[in-house]
Image (cartoon, rainbow, N blue to C red):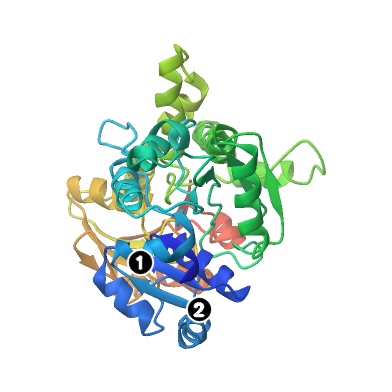
Amino acid sequence: MSDVAIVGAGYVGLPLAQVFADAGKSVLLVDVARGVVDGINRGESHIEDVSSERLGPHVAAGLIRATVDYDELRAADAIVIALATPLTKQREPDLTIIKRASEGIALRLRPGQLVVLESTTYPGTTREVVQPILESGGLRAGEDFNLAFSPERVDPGRTDWTTANVPKVVGGVTPACTARAAALYAAAVETVHTVSSPEAAELTKLLENIFRSVNIALVNELAQLCDRMRIDVWEVVEAAATKPFGFMSFKPGPGLGGHCIPIDPFYLTWKAREYGFYTEFIELAGKVNENMPYYCRSVISQALNHGAERSLKGSEILVLGVAYKADIGDVRESPAVKLIELLRNAGSEVSYHDPHVPAVSGLRSVPLEPGAYDAVVIVTAHSSIDYGQLVADARLVVDLRNATGGNGQASPKVWKL
């Protein structure tokens, strides 16, 4: 018997399990990856945000256990679905994983259980997709079992805002479902905010990520204009950020990465078409952000051409940082992967160094020897790198993150986004 079963032991599921266990709840993690399950049961974490030192004692105490057997869901009071919701190649929602999990749960669902979907998706998924599958065995949501949506809000690598203290938004298919789900999370999370429906909760998560996508696109577009105007975009953003109201600082970069921002807005644009509505603002932001690796390739080409009298073809380039954000090892949707592909297609000999990512795109991280390359491209600004020494040692630096700061601005060897 477990208090909570979490389907999916990844970037969302494992931190959530830790938070519930911290509150004294018994947690069962269900995952299809046998290696992941066996590792968890040994007290070994595969997620950077959950250390083995934190996980191990919970496993030893019997508060966290993992399995590949869906039959064990029958004994759980609550079932949380924390699985990926990718896009197809045509940028349309792919709910295959969620549907399969729901089918597996439906076969084991018993009266009195609570089911909560946490996977980011379009408004209507909980009621229109998950609910009919769960009800296929004859039980009814709101009558025989409770059903709700509560979006995950994980930001990998953060220590100030975690699963435990980021407010939890909850919306159920009935008021009773909302109350039951809110009570579940209130036992482990500091703040729970309830909304009127799962659709409102689903759209809340999309709004959060669309807000970031649109503002990042704005500053990415401004960076391209600043290049033509010979104005330092980083100086402009820093100056604007001194205003204590009416402005939020967003930084330009080589593109969007991670499991949310590059993907989630397209869930809403797809759903909006069902209502004859076209989210042009959101789609334009997506276009700007998706173009950034191509623009950055051209910046690298210009830097080599004007700074070293070399072309991309045949140049040896070191990409510094391939994770999608600093100080983590997550490469999901990382713009560095696309940039490496573009540079290789242009004939460059590409290597990379990343202390958090041992291998990606058929390459392995190499030692940091900046002087051995025609150019070093800073794609992800990990804090462990000495960027002052990097500028001193490298022949040419293309800084896409303003990691070199004032040193970069003063050095003729540094080209900035």
Q: What amino acid is found at the position of numbered circle 1 in the picture?
A: Glu
Q: How many marks?
A: 2
Q: Which residue is mark 1?
A: 72
Report the front residue among 349 and 189: 189
Residue at the far right: name it: 244
Q: Is residue 201 visible?
A: yes
Q: Residue at x 46, y 72 (%)?
A: 1
Q: Quadrant of residue 352?
A: bottom left
Residue at the far top: name it: 276
> Residue 185, position in %: x, y?
62, 58
Q: Quadrant of residue 37?
A: bottom left
> Residue 403, position in %: x, y?
53, 60
Mark 1 vs 2, N-terminal side? 2
Q: Which residue is mark 2?
A: 63
* CA neighbours of label 1 inside 10 A, class few (<14), some (14 to 19), many (20+): some
Q: With respect to residue 46, does 308 lie above or below?
A: above
Q: With respect to residue 163, does 400 lie above or below?
A: above
Q: What amino acid is found at the position of numbered circle 2 in the picture?
A: Leu
Q: With respect to residue 369, does 148 lie above or below?
A: above
Question: Quick check: 126 left or right of 352?
Answer: right
Report the front residue among 413 and 193: 193
Instruction: Determine contact: label 1, label 2, CB under 8 Å.
Output: no
Q: Is residue 295 visible?
A: no
Query: Helix, strand, or loop for circle 1?
Result: helix
Q: Residue at x 31, y 38 (%)?
A: 94
> Residue 230, position in %: x, y?
55, 36
Q: Residue at x 56, y 52 (%)?
A: 153
Question: Quick check: 91 left or right of 200?
Answer: left
